[in-house]
């Protein structure tokens, strides 16, 4: 049974250590997927490697680099003048709180998803380059989040003229008291 009350908070040092482990884990995924792709497509099947193979490798490297760099900059700790840990950085493993409420595109969970999607597509593309079409899921998800969190509410928001006062007859009909 889950404990009741307020969830326990993590200390700066615990966040720092967990962020370091998380970054290490995703670096291993990046290096492993890239090594498999390079070994299969650029070494074993080198004669059959086309420009698309090299382009896909460059694309995945750019995606990995941008995502990992963003995650590491979010998790960058701050140290005091005496060398003690002043801030552990943003918690990359946060499951509740601002991550569940804020659809910001640079959230760690979205960056982790991009790294995992790219790694899966990269390894599976050793069998067929058509697997790269699955990477279109990332911009599709971004467009979905953009619509649900920003554009949809903006388009469907009721607009009221700022200078209009509520009509007294309408208020009596609906039963709302005048202000």
Image: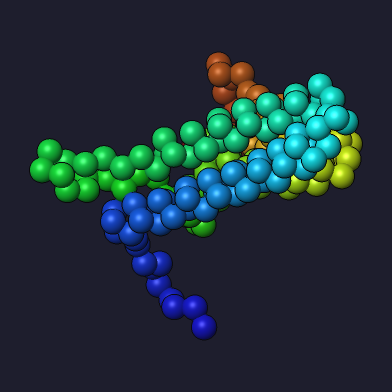
At horizontal 22% and vertical 45% (from top left) the residue drawn is 86
The answer to whether 5 appears left or right of 171 in the picture is left
Counting labels gives 0
Q: What residue is shown at x 56% (from left), y 18% (from top)?
A: 162
Q: Looking at the image, which residue is at 12% across and 38% down?
A: 81
Q: Nearer the viewer, residue 62 or 165?
A: 62
- Measured as percent of width and height from the top left, residue 9 is found at 35, 62
The answer to whether residue 31 is visible is yes
In the rendered view, would you say 130 is above or below 166? below
Determine which quarter of the picture holds residue 159.
Answer: top right
Relative to 112, residue 94 above or below:
below
Q: Residue furthest bottom?
A: 1
- Answer with the quarter of the image where residue 121 lies: top right
Q: Residue at x 51, y 57 (%)?
A: 95
Q: Position of residue 50 (x, y in %)?
A: 84, 25
- In this image, 142 relative to 100: left or right? right
Q: Nearer the viewer, residue 22 or 105?
A: 22
Q: Specify whether 103 is left or right of 50.
A: left
x then y, percent, for residue 117: 70, 44
In percent of width and height, residue 26 lies at 55, 48
- Asked whether, in this view, residue 101 is left or right of residue 172, the answer is left
């Amino acid at each position: 049974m889950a404990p009741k009350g307020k969830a326990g908070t993590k200390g700066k040092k615990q966040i720092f250590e967990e962020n370091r482990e998380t970054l290490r884990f995703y670096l291993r995924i990046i290096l492993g997927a890239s090594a498999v792709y390079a070994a299969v497509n650029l070494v074993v099947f080198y004669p059959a490697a086309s420009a698309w193979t090299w382009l896909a490798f460059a694309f995945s490297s750019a995606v990995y680099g941008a995502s990992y760099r963003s995650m590491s900059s979010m998790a960058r700790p701050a140290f005091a003048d005496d060398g003690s840990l002043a801030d552990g950085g943003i918690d990359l493993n946060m499951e509740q709180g601002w991550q569940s409420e804020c659809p910001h595109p640079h959230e760690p969970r979205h960056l982790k998803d991009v790294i995992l999607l790219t790694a899966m597509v990269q390894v599976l593309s050793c069998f067929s380059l058509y697997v790269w079409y699955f990477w279109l899921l990332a911009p599709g998800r971004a467009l979905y989040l953009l619509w649900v969190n920003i554009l949809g509410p903006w388009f469907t928001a009721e607009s009221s003229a700022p200078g209009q006062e509520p009509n007294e007859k309408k208020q009596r009909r609906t039963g709302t008291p005048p202000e």
